[in-house]
């Protein structure tokens, strides 16, 4: 399994407007706080990247006594995250070996990152270890096995083969969490739509989508040229695009 060098793309990572626009207020975290009254909450953004989730939630939940933490393996991503979130405690480490004592966190969120881990079972073990009893682990990711018509795979077909090595099926995620003592709920949000290719060309050119950094330069260039060729023939070119997101809530009991 190949790994994306996020330090190499950190400076252009936030140029993808979807990354900022798609982040919603975390009502699952708010519900947890409302159901567990305590003096302070320890919340970890696992693989926090450039800190966009933390910015959004800190404003949304500013009235609650939350101590925020962010962990990432890419130093350049953390550098940017620190510029946005001055009061968050950041740690440079791998998810397979986190520098936290057992039973520390009330809530751990993991956005669009689980597929990057080389030893996913070890990450789950670590997550379980550092969570308090009744704590919640929230995982949010794309569900590639339900999105064969994703525009990325349409123009860069070798990308699916790379992703198939990185992403676990939802059944496997459910099983691995359940066998470790989590109460697990998973749902998939799927949509199929017609999209304008011109609106995605810049995203392809930015080459910040992780799987596009993993395919060969030749495959990448061929896909990019195919997009441009289609747009040269018809600037209003559309394709069918499907997209699926997996939301997993796992409670330690």
Image: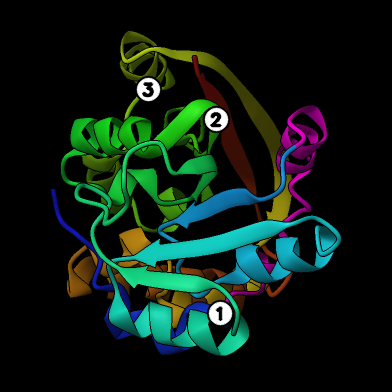
Q: Quadrant of residue 230?
A: bottom right
**Above or below, 30 relative to 239:** above
To which residue does mark 3 refer? 173
To which residue does mark 1 refer? 14
Q: Is residue 57 left or right of residue 215?
A: right
Circle nearer the N terminus (3, 2): 2
On the image, the x and y values in percent for residue 90 come to 43, 72
Label annotation for residue 209: none
On the image, the x and y values in percent for residue 84 come to 61, 84
Q: Which residues are magenta?
A: 16-37
- Foreground label between 1 and 2: 2
Residue at the left extreme of this rendering: 1
* Separation of marks 3 and 2 at Cα, in angstroms: 18 Å
Instruction: Residue at 60%, 79% (x, y): give it.
Output: 87
Secondary-structure class at tag 1: loop
**Above or below, 145 relative to 204:** above
On the image, the x and y values in percent for residue 217 come to 20, 74
* Separation of marks 1 and 2 at Cα, in angstroms: 30 Å
Along the line of sight, the residue nearer the viewer: 48 or 226? 48
Circle nearer the N terminus (3, 1): 1
Q: Is residue 118 visible?
A: yes
Along the line of sight, the residue nearer the viewer: 253 or 141? 253
Circle nearer the N terminus (1, 2): 1
Along the line of sight, the residue nearer the viewer: 163 or 220? 163
Secondary-structure class at tag 3: helix
**Above or below, 176 relative to 130:** above
* Separation of marks 3 and 1 at Cα, in angstroms: 28 Å
Instruction: Residue at 38%, 12% (x, y): give it.
Output: 181
To which residue does mark 2 refer? 135
Secondary-structure class at tag 2: strand
Q: Is residue 59 left or right of residue 117?
A: right
Instruction: Residue at 67%, 50% (x, y): give it.
Output: 40
């Amino acid at each position: 399994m190949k790994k994306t060098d996020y330090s190499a793309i950190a400076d252009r990572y936030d140029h993808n407007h979807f990354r900022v626009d798609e982040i919603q207020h975390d009502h699952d975290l708010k519900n947890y706080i409302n159901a567990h009254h305590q003096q302070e909450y320890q919340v970890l953004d696992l693989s926090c990247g450039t800190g966009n989730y933390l910015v959004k939630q800190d404003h949304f939940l500013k009235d609650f006594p939350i101590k925020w933490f962010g962990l990432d393996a890419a130093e350049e991503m953390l550098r940017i995250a620190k510029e946005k979130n001055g009061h968050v405690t950041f740690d440079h480490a791998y998810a397979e070996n986190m520098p936290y004592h057992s039973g520390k966190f009330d809530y751990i969120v993991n956005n669009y990152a689980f597929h990057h881990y080389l030893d996913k079972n070890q990450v789950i073990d670590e997550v379980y270890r550092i969570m308090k009893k009744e704590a919640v682990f929230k995982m949010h990711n794309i569900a590639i096995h339900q999105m064969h018509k994703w525009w990325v795979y349409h123009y860069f077909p070798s990308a699916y083969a790379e992703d198939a090595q990185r992403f676990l099926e939802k059944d496997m995620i459910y099983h691995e969490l359940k066998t470790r003592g989590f109460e697990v709920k998973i749902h998939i949000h799927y949509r199929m739509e017609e999209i304008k290719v011109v609106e995605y060309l810049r995203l392809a050119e930015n080459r910040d989508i992780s799987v596009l950094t993993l395919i060969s330069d030749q495959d990448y260039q061929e896909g990019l040229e195919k997009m441009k060729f289609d747009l040269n023939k018809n600037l209003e070119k559309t394709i069918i695009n499907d997209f699926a997101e997996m939301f997993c809530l796992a409670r330690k009991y």
